[in-house]
Image: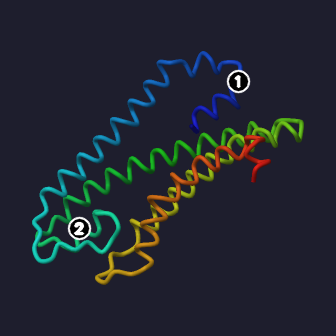
Amino acid sequence: MAYDRYVAICKPLHYETIMNRRACVQMAAIAWISVILYSSLHTGNTFSITFCGGNMVDQFFCEIPQLFKLACSNSYFNEVGVIAFGVCLTLSCFVFIIVTYVQILTTVLRIPSEQGRHKTFSTCLPHLIVISMFLSTGVFAYMKPISSSPSALDLVVAVLYSVLPPVMNPIIYSIRNKEIKASL
């Protein structure tokens, strides 16, 4: 979406040429391949863990940090590799989004009319809100230390991370619709 916004705002006359069917298929394929690779690494690593003791996960979802609390084996180095790959993947996407929006911002600030700047910002703002909401809850969920006892904060963060962005996504993107604004 960041690249689509960039092309639409910074290169509007070349939009049809740049954002053709082939480019869209390539971007979708890259996203699917990276997600399949990342989830395969996590799944393979999870199956290599030896579990002992109880099988109660103190979470709504069976997430990796919670599984490590149930593990007998020390698969720390395997998971560090998977996490390093995930961090590289996430950082590359995040840097791409930041660079893209910096270029969009410099282009928007050169627009002479106030109405044109407002319209352009209202196009980009929903995407930035959804991305920042998803990343901030995800960083908080995965970067905090694993506690030995379950806390209500862990459960709230898990719900915020997994439920809030998908629920808010259609609401945020539809606010630009005049009928939705009128009904709100």
Looking at the figure, which quarter contains the N terminus?
A: top right
| SS at circle 2 | helix
Mark 2 surroundings: few (<14), some (14-19) or many (≥20) residues within 10 A:
some
**Residues under labels 2 and 1: Cα distance?**
48 Å
Answer with left or right where residue 163 lies relative to residue 1: left
Residue at x 62%, y 17% (from the top left corner): 16
The residue under label 2 is 67
Q: Is residue 30 above or below residue 63?
A: above
Mark 1 surroundings: few (<14), some (14-19) or many (≥20) residues within 10 A:
few
Front residue (pair 77, 155): 155
Residue lying at the far bottom of the rendered structure:
149
User: The disc labelled 1 sits on which kind of residue?
Assistant: Pro
Residue at x 67%, y 44% (from the top left corner): 174
The image shows residue 12 at horizontal and vertical percentages of 70, 24
For marks 2 and 1, the one nearer the N-term is 1
Residue lying at the far top of the rendered structure:
17
The residue under label 1 is 12
The image shows residue 106 at horizontal and vertical percentages of 73, 41
Answer with left or right where residue 90 lies relative to residue 130: left
User: The disc labelled 2 sits on which kind of residue?
Assistant: Leu
Residue at x 54%, y 54% (from the top left corner): 167
The image shows residue 32 at horizontal and vertical percentages of 36, 36
